[in-house]
Amino acid sequence: MDIVYASLHRKEAAGPAPDGEAEEVQATLWAHARPADALQHITVRCAPKQVDLLLYLLTRPTTNAGSATGHPADPPPSAAGATDSLAIAYGLLSRSHRASPLLRRRYQPPVPPAAR
């Protein structure tokens, strides 16, 4: 299992996060997760200036005949998309941010891993 730490920074850091915001962020991420993301668990902690995330992703073997996860019904790695955990996490955060009015309204867009 790979664990990726990520943060989304608030557009306005005006005090404590509203009640239930961590649950809303978590639900948004689950709603936009794809099977190829291999997301297993999400931990969310809201702070005044940001929301901190731990994304637990199922580790995938890099050399496997047939699929990214080893399951025969899964697409091969080339069709499954990125297999790098940081790229997978960034893809999930970006998809979620684009699709969620809550995330777009309250948080800056995620920064790509290569730009850090």
Image (spheres, rainbow, N blue to C red):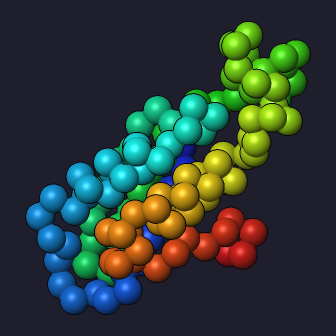
Q: Quadrant of residue 18?
A: bottom left
Asked whether 18 or 48 is in front, the reply is 18
Q: Is residue 2 above or below residue 98?
A: above
**Count of numbered circles on the image:** 0
Q: Is residue 116 left or right of residue 63?
A: left
Q: What residue appears at the point 44 percent right and 70 percent down from the top-left corner? A: 8
Looking at this rendering, what residue extends furthest in the top direction?
Answer: 72
**Left or right of 37, for residue 70:** right
- Above or below — where is 44 with respect to 41? below
**What residue do we see at 36% from left, 69% from top?**
101
Q: Is residue 63 visible?
A: yes
Is residue 57 visible to the viewer in this orientation of the structure?
no
Residue 75 is situated, as x and y percent measured from the top left of the image, at 76, 24
Across and down, in percent, residue 23 comes to: 23, 52
- Residue 108 lies left or right of residue 50; in this view the side is right
Query: Residue 43: image x %, image y %?
Result: 35, 47
Residue 76, position in %: x, y? 82, 26
Q: Residue at x 72, y 75 (%)?
A: 115
Q: Quadrant location of the N terminus?
A: top right
- Quadrant for the C terminus, please: bottom right
Towards the viewer: 1 or 97:
97
Residue shown at 56% from the left, 63% from the top: 94
Give residue 64's quadrant in the image.
top right
Q: Please, is residue 51 above or below residue 37 in the view?
A: below
